[in-house]
Amino acid sequence: MQNENYIVLGMKDISFFKEKSKQIRKDIVHTAFAAQKGHIPSAFSMIEILVMLYYQLAKITPEMAQDRDRIILSKGHGCLGQYAILADLNFFPKEELLRFCSKEGILGGHPSRKVPGIEVSTGSLGHGPSLGIGMALTNKNSNVFVIVGDGECNEGSVWEAALAANKHQLDNFWIIVDYNKYQSYDHTQVICPLDDLKEKWQSFGFQCEEVDTINSPYSFMESFARLQKTKGPKCIVSHSIKGLGAKALEGNLSHHHLRSMSEDFRNQLLMEIDSHA
């Protein structure tokens, strides 16, 4: 599916992304239902971005070694989405998803390097950007994409890394901000206002664009194409909704960390995913 003509998406491409995004969301629900735990809304808000990265933009396959691109999920608690995609791309058997957070399985509640396709162990927030800069410095022929949460941007280490990326003028280093407006316990505006996040990244030397992932997710491709032609580190701020794709989850903090899921609620989520435009 990797395609250099990513800026021009035909109906076939858009249909593929829509169906793949629904499939990944359903895989997440089945995974969380089997484990009776997991951060579903944090995963849902970035599914379209992950799908476009893994299935179109990044050079990543299970067979590629040093010459592959890197995708680092710095907001590691959203790992259910990344696991579902890695399984779909045959990094490990899909059956492994149903052993999520069990002693018999390899998939933990946060990403671990023991899992095929996971570049670095994450969970403690703010570490992904610095680790990504190291990778971008040592292999300038590959792109490094680091996905951070908006709440994660409260971490000082994120901005220390941003300074370093600009200092080294890393053309191959990308920050993708999953700007879903929430963190664990409240709205990001309440916990620590981010104000104009695009302007902030620009002030740290990044070429930056914003994308409306709620209404026009595939404009991400156009932003990617424009930014790829620029020098220095790049950033895309993806405006989203926590729980995007299932009405029962959207903007509902009570589902931040799943403690249990009834069969009825699972079926409701699956129906809502199907009806999502």
Image (spheres, rainbow, N blue to C red):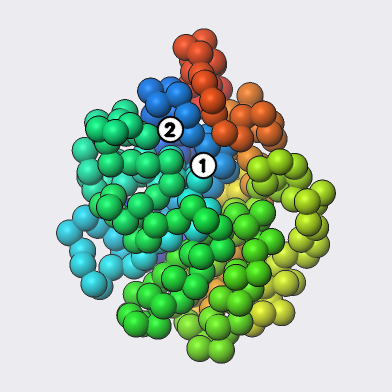
Residue with the most extreme top position = 264
Residue nearer the viewer, 110 or 277: 110
User: In the rendering, at what x and y percent does residue 212 appear?
Assistant: 65, 52
- Sequence-first tag of 1 and 2: 2
Residue at 37%, 34% (x, y): give it: 101
Discs 1, 2 touching: Cβ within 8 Å: yes
User: In the rendering, at what x and y percent does residue 21 appear?
Assistant: 45, 39
Q: Is residue 203 above or below residue 44?
A: below
Residue at 23%, 72% (x, y): give it: 66
Residue at 65%, 56% (x, y): give it: 150
Provide the secondary structure element on which disc 1 rests.
helix
- Please identify the quadrant where the C terminus is shown: top right
Q: In this view, does 140 lie above or below 45?
A: below
Instruction: Say left or right for 254 vs 125.
Output: right
Residue type, numbered disc 2: Ile
Instruction: Say left or right for 20 vs 91.
Output: right
Residue nearer the viewer, 112 or 266: 112
Residue with the most extreme front position = 103
Q: Name the residue under label 2.
A: 28
Q: Is residue 181 above or below residue 138?
A: above
Rendering quarter of residue 88? top left
Badge 2: few (under 14), some or many (20 or more) residues near its Cα, within 10 Å? Answer: many
User: In the rendering, at what x and y percent does residue 30 appear?
Assistant: 40, 25
Mark 1 to mark 2: distance in Å?
8 Å
- Residue 43 numbered mark, or none: 1
- Residue 201 in sight in this render: yes
Residue at 45%, 65% (x, y): give it: 145
Residue type, numbered disc 1: Ala
